[in-house]
Each structure stands twice: as C-alpha cells, then as structure tokens.
Amino acid sequence: MAETARFRHAIWRQVDPEAYERQGLSPTNRAVIWIVAVSSILAILETEPTVENMAPRVFAQLEWIFAVVFFLEYLVRLWAEGESPRFRGVQGRIRYALTLSAIVDLIAFLPTLLLPLLPGKSNFMLLRVFRLIRILRLARLGRFSLAMRHLSQAVTDRKEELLLSLMLATFVLVFSAAGMYVLEGENDPQTFGSIPRAMWWSVCTLTTVGYGDIYPHTVLGKILGGVTSIAGIGLIAMPTGILAAASSAAFQQTRLTRQGDTGWN
Amino acid sequence: MAETARFRHAIWRQVDPEAYERQGLSPTNRAVIWIVAVSSILAILETEPTVENMAPRVFAQLEWIFAVVFFLEYLVRLWAEGESPRFRGVQGRIRYALTLSAIVDLIAFLPTLLLPLLPGKSNFMLLRVFRLIRILRLARLGRFSLAMRHLSQAVTDRKEELLLSLMLATFVLVFSAAGMYVLEGENDPQTFGSIPRAMWWSVCTLTTVGYGDIYPHTVLGKILGGVTSIAGIGLIAMPTGILAAASSAAFQQTRLTRQGDTGWN
Amino acid sequence: MAETARFRHAIWRQVDPEAYERQGLSPTNRAVIWIVAVSSILAILETEPTVENMAPRVFAQLEWIFAVVFFLEYLVRLWAEGESPRFRGVQGRIRYALTLSAIVDLIAFLPTLLLPLLPGKSNFMLLRVFRLIRILRLARLGRFSLAMRHLSQAVTDRKEELLLSLMLATFVLVFSAAGMYVLEGENDPQTFGSIPRAMWWSVCTLTTVGYGDIYPHTVLGKILGGVTSIAGIGLIAMPTGILAAASSAAFQQTRLTRQGDTGWN
Amino acid sequence: MAETARFRHAIWRQVDPEAYERQGLSPTNRAVIWIVAVSSILAILETEPTVENMAPRVFAQLEWIFAVVFFLEYLVRLWAEGESPRFRGVQGRIRYALTLSAIVDLIAFLPTLLLPLLPGKSNFMLLRVFRLIRILRLARLGRFSLAMRHLSQAVTDRKEELLLSLMLATFVLVFSAAGMYVLEGENDPQTFGSIPRAMWWSVCTLTTVGYGDIYPHTVLGKILGGVTSIAGIGLIAMPTGILAAASSAAFQQTRLTRQGDTGWN
C-alpha cells in the first residue's frame, strides 16, 4: 500500500502546478497545455463550414478522443489531489470537485460526452452554444500561469480606481447618448430614437472604434459628436494610466517574488 | 425638544455623507444610491418606444413615485442640514438650497412634479429635454464618491497642462481642417467646402474614431490625412501622459488620506 | 527726449512677454491674444458660405480692421524692441524683423493689405491659400505661452527617441503596405495595386483610424490586416510612453522653474 | 603588405559601425544609409504604374546600378571584416557571411542580379514578391542604429509580460468572436457564420480600428460589441503600460551607456 501512496504522491507532483518541486511546469502539465491548445484550435476551425466539410468525420473523432483524454485527466487529478492536505478523503474530493479549476476542467469534456444522449441534436442554437463551451477549454490554461495570478491580484488591488473610471465612462456614455437623442432623435428615429439606441453610437465613439454605421448629420449633432470623441480620449487615458501603473507594479512584485523563490530553493 | 434635536442629529448623520461616524456610506445613503440608479435606468428605458409600450402606465406611475420619494428626501435633507454649523437657521437653509448638490437634488424631481402644470405636454422637443433632465439624477451619485472628489481635485491641479494640450489639439485640428479645405474643397464642397465643415473630418481623424463618412480622395489630401492621423497619436499621447500621472498621484493621495483617517479613527 | 525713452521703455515692458515685470502677461498682450483669437474665429467662419452670405461686407470690413490693427501693433513692437539690448539701432531692428516671431506677425496682416494689389483676385485656389494664411495668426499665440516653450524644449530633448519610434512606424507602415500589395494587389488594383496606394490603408489601420473605405477581402489579407492592427497598438504605445515621460518631466521642470522665479522675485 | 593591412584596417573602421573610432557613424556608412533610403523609395514608387510609366527604363537602370553598388559594398565588407578578431581567415569570412546582417545585405542585391537568369519573368506574383524583397533593404538600416539595438534588448527583457498580455488579448479575441458567432451567426452567416470569420470583426473592434465593413445588428450582438470595445481599451492599456515602462527604461540605459562611452573615449 505504501507503494500506491508513493505512486500517488509522484502523480500529484506532476499534475498540481503548485506541488511541482522545480521551477516552471511539470512535463505532464506542459503536455496538457499543448492538448488544450490543439483541441481549442480544432474547435475553432470546426465552426468554419469550408474547413469542416473537408473532413467532418476526422473532426468528430478527434473531438471524441480529446474529450476522453480530458475525462481521464480529470479522474487522475481527482484521485491525486487526495495528497493535498485540503482535499484529503471523500469530503476533500467533493470540496476539490467544487473548486473553480475543477469545474472548468469538467465543463471541458462533459458536453462532448453527453451530446449523444441529447434528443434534439439538430438544434442549431444548442449546437453553437455547445461549441462555444468547448472553446472555454482555453480558460483551463489560466491555472498554469503564475504571472496571470499575480496580474489578477494587481487588478483586484486597484478595483476601486478602475470601478470609478468605469463609472465616469458610464456617465459620459449615458449623457452623450441622451444628448444625441435630444438633438438627432427626431430626424433619425431608427438610430437615435431612444437613449438605449443612441448608446450604440456612444460606445462606438467613446472607445474610438467608429464603425461608421451611425453618425450625426445635423450641425449640433456633429458638435456633440466631436466633444464626445475628445471626451473619449480622456476616458481611455484614465484606465490606461491606472492599468499601466497596476501592471508595472504587478510585474515588479512578480520579479521580487521570483527572486525570493530562487533564493531559498 | 431635546428629543427632536437628538432625532434630527441622528437623521443628519444618516443623510450627510461627511457626517456619518463610520467609514463608508450610511444605510440611508446606500438606499438613495440604489433608488437613483433604478430610477435612472427606468428613465433611460422609457425613451425606447418598444419598451415603454409594453407598460406605459407602469412607467408613468413609477416615475411619479420616484419623484415623490426624491421630494421627501429633499425636505428631510433641508431640515437635517440645520445640524451642520454652516447651514444653521433660515439663512443657513437658503445657503444650503443654493449649493450645487442641493440644486442637483431639486432638479432630480421638480420637472416630474411640474409637468402636469405645463400646457403643451405634447411638445416633442420639450418632452425629450425633460427626459434628459431626469437622467441628470445620475449626477446625484457624485456627492457620495470620495474618490471622485479627490480625482477632480487632481485634474484641477493639472488644469494648466491639460489646457495647453487642449490648445495644441485645437491648433492641429484647425490647421488640418484648413489644409483639407485648400486641397479638397473644390472637389468635394459638401464635406470640405469650408473650414468648419472640414473640422468634422479633422476631429474624427485626430481622435482616431474614423467613421468613414468623410475621407480625402485626392493624393495630396490622403497624404495630409495620413500626417493628421499620425499627429493624432501624438495628441492622444500627451493628455494620456498628463492624466495618467495626475490620476496616479491622486490615488496615492487618496490612499495616504485614508490611511491617515484609519490612524486617528 | 528722456521722456520718449521712458515712454518707449514702458511700451516695451507691455509688448514683450519676457520684459513684463510681473508674473503672467501684460494687459496689452492679453488684449492681443483676444484680438488674435476673435480674428482667427472670423477667418474660419468666413470660409463657410452659409455664414459669410449672411453679412459678406461686415466680414470684409472686420478683416480689414484687424489687418490694420495688426499692422500698427507690428510697428509698435518694431519700435519698442529697440529697448532690448539685442535689437538696438537700425541693424538690431533688422535682426528683430528676421526673428520667427516677427515674421509670423508680419504674415498675419500682410496678405490682407496686399490683396487689393493682386490682379487675379478671383483665383479660387489663391483665395483659399490666402485664407489659410490668415488662420496662421493662431501661431502668434505661441509666443505668449511659457509652458509651450518648455514643452517644445522637452520634445527636442527626446528628439532621438521620437525619431526612432517614427522610423519604426515607417518600417511597419511600408512592410504592411508591401505585404498587402503582394496579397491583394491582383484582386483590387484600384486600392492595393501599388505600395504607395496600399500605404493609405496602412496608415489608416496602424493609427487605428479605420475609415473603412479600404479593407482586405481575402483570407490572407485579413490575417495581415489583423496583424497590422495589433502592431499598430505597439506603435501607438511607444511614442505614448516617450511623450508621456517627456511631458511629465517638462511640467515638473516648469514647476521647479516657476518656484525658483517666485523665490527671487 | 603592411600597407595593404593598414588600408584594410582603415576601410574596416569605415564600414563597421562598431569599429569607427569617433561617436556616431562614419562618412561611408552615412552614404550607405542615403543610398539604401533612395533605393527603397525608388522601389516603392516603381510599384505605382502611373509613376513607373513615366520613365520605365530609368527605373530599371537605376535599380541595376543600386544592385551593383550593394554588391561591391558587400564584397568590401566581407574583405574588411577580416580585421575583426571574430571573422579572421576563410572560416571567419564564412561565419561573417552567415550573420543576420550579412544575409540581409545579400538579399538586398541578389534578386536584382539573378532576375535576368529566371525564365518566367512575366509571372505576376513572383514579380511582386521580388519587389517586396527589394524593400527589405530598409532592414539594412537597423544595423546602424544603436538605440534600436538597446530597444530590442528592452523588449526582449519584458518578453514574458508582453507575451502574457498578448495571450490575454487572444483569449478576449476568441471569446468575443465565439460569442458573436453564437448570437449573430444565424442572421449573418457570411460574416459571423464561423468563429474564424467572426475573428475579423473581433480584431477590428478590439484594436479600435473599426472599419465598419462588419458590425452587429441584433440588440444582444450590439451589447456584446460594446463590451468588446470597452475590453479593447483595457487590452490596449496593458501593453501600452508595459512598452512605455520598457522603452523609458531602455532609453535611460542608453543614456547611461552613452555617458559611460563619453567618459573613457
């Protein structure tokens, strides 16, 4: 029985990125990253009819193989995580299965395995949502990135400032849309006939995307449009400044942490 | 009478964000924020005919209820602010009623209460402006945000620098419009036939919005357009730098102030 | 004669921004700024036929009055600058007349005064260029701005870095245009049939203006377009960083200089 | 023989930018920069039929002259680099010929010299690729720029951070495209009918280019489009911050290095 325990410990060190004894990722997790990437690219390409029609059965079979691989990987992780103090025993396993990482892992293969059981496979919308879910596999990569965890920490630290600039952006968005509704609503009811409609124009202008499907035609509307565009630069500048400072601080911290790691390893 | 005074003091601590004894906002002000947000969202949705026609009477009644609530809140604030040394007595109340916050509060409900008294309710433009005013309620949220007051302070500190970059932007705007008027005015009088007309193109290009309703057609015009686009990046970069530095400084100051608050609280 | 000298000295202190004894600008120069601004706005509005046709004679007369005022101001400055050690005597006056500021001042009124002497006043292009010159009056404001002189100094200091990022931008511009010429030139010779033609698309894409008059249609062209757009963000980020650092440094220096001024004044 | 060695040493000091004894570039390399620039501009202009048809033979002859000049320059560099300890002897010359700089130099003239030997000169695509290669001459300028080498070092230092933000951008790109495929794919199969197709819209929106050839039409699609545009600002802000910090650090280092150079020269 000690041999099983030692074997499980070795497996655990391979599959849990935080349990791996050396720097970086274990060979197993490197392989998982490649499988996730390839399977996601296939799931993206498969939605394009001209590509899928070249070899529809190959895509279906590959998808099935990937789902089985992810299923087995899920079982191995569930079994091996018993080595972690937090997830010991049956109760610990249930607790593990309810972590965000494990749920994302489950979603990555479950729909493919359950699809044959569904009656209305021909449902168009359902098929699309199901394909979208498969691409969510990409989110599995998040667990492997140390820098990403540090970065999301940094964004969380500046949550309040970012929320304030988002709130300011919402104010300008609503008021420019309301102004356009007052100025151009009568002439152009299809696009500026209500504030929610005018907000499509506002968001395109404030983010400086400017598709050009909607733009003001009256002189007053153009003046408001110009002021909104210029305000948009200010609204881009504020989160840019905050995120720039936050990301720069986050990377400095990452570097310090890493130097610390190198120190006592 | 002492009981009334104690009651008014308790109410004042609830309604004035600066008089609240703990950190953050009082439960009353939290409730006001939610009511303002919900009433603004309703005012925005109501402008959309497809939404309003689903239940026109419900919207009208809800609007009436919100206006009455804001009216009562206004009276309570006016009465309770007597606790503040600045606004004691009848003269103090008049001084309070003339503060920006109180005027914004008044505008938030007065138009709704006065609308039935107006004769020409069917006036289209008037109705639109009236709806715009109701959305100004969102501006009431400004009084509750400590960070916003700090930020506006920071922008005021750098007023001169921001004005200079606005002035430079105006120069480039006018000269690129004038150049386009000279180069393309003859070919395309509708859009480049005068400098004010060409400024619509200039502002769309310098802010990199680029709707695509107007663009140069001649070779010289395209060269000027390219130079203008590249100048636009410089003009975006300057206020971005200033605002980034200003907002970063402002948030540092906010943090210091808050730490100071925590220190002696 | 001493009275004339004292009078000239007083006038010189009024008209030369650097000779004014107090901080800020002299009342005379404040008035000049307003006259320049009003005359420029009139020159801009005059190009719009719907505005000019309202009162064509008023515009022509105002323009004439402004030109005479600027002419007199020019003579006064020329006479008063004799107080400055650099511009003493006849030779000094000639040296003053050849400074950039004096030439800009001359251009601000000369065309208006010379226009009646020209034979072919009806020439359309000439009239437009002449109007453009009148708007160059705005450049006169540059001499009054201390911050502008500091800023242009800062940009000059980082000249090399900005040139490098401009050079890099030119590289990406040329290579993306050349790539599009190879990929889409055959299908769309009108817009991508040569590298100079494709550069119009490149500049619109790299600066993220994106008018939408030209865009790739083939799959390979769209991939190159996407890569170019993403490269554009990098090319915007680089000068933004340099200009942000430069302007922030420049404003710090301005503040220090001003504090120094306050110190010994 | 000593004279030949001294001559070769003098030539080497002229052609190798790092061997030149004074600051800046040698007169020879300055001349080379000008020849590269002029020849590249000619290669760009030549692709425009209206320009080339003005003097097709002149363009062909100039191109031939430039290729011969670059060929001779290549031979001189190959011969003179024997002075460098790294590239001594025949083996050293082969090592030199395999450096990136030497290969770029070779590509700059070889296609022109080999073109007459090719049988199918009339091949359209081949001619275009050949012209593209000639513009690659611009890349030769890279070897002369000290700042460029420092900058590319700085970007390499922050490789990891830039890769992470590129990865995040890819995530948002894929998910917004997948969302649009689910929401608008049925209505608009031509543009949103598959995830790869929808990615063209995503990249145009996230980079805020916004050509306007594709945009969402349904309400849900417009909401997703608005969220994507706003996410785009965040994705622009992150690399801007990183690149700004990197370039600012790089230029500081350049300045320090240069001061150090001045110190011991």
Image (cartoon, coloured by chain):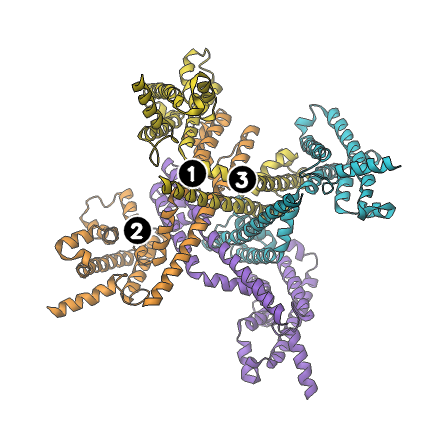
Chain colours: A orange, B yellow, C cyan, D purple
Front residue of this view, candidates D1 and C151: C151
Report the amino acid beneath label 3.
Asp
First-in-chain label (3 vs 1): 1
Front residue of this view, candidates D248 and C231: D248
Percent coordinates x, y for residue D149 in the rendering: 54, 65
Q: Which chain carries label 2?
A: A
Q: Nearer the viewer, mark 1 or mark 2?
A: 1
| Residues at discs 3 and 2 both on one chain | no
Q: Distance between the residues labelled 3 and 1?
A: 15 Å
Which dot marks residue A136?
2
Residue in the picture at 51% in, 56% down: C183
Q: Which chain carries label 1?
A: B
- Is D189 situated above or below D258? above
Quadrant for the C terminus of chain D, please. Answer: bottom right
Identify residue for label 1.
B147
- Is D127 situated above or below B63? below
Q: Residue furthest right?
A: C1
Query: Dot 2, crowdedness within 10 Å: few (<14), some or many (≥20)?
Result: many
| Quadrant in which residue C170 is drawn | bottom right
| Quadrant in which residue B83 is drawn | top left
* Left/right of residue A151 with respect to residue D79 in the rendered view: left
Which dot marks residue D144?
none
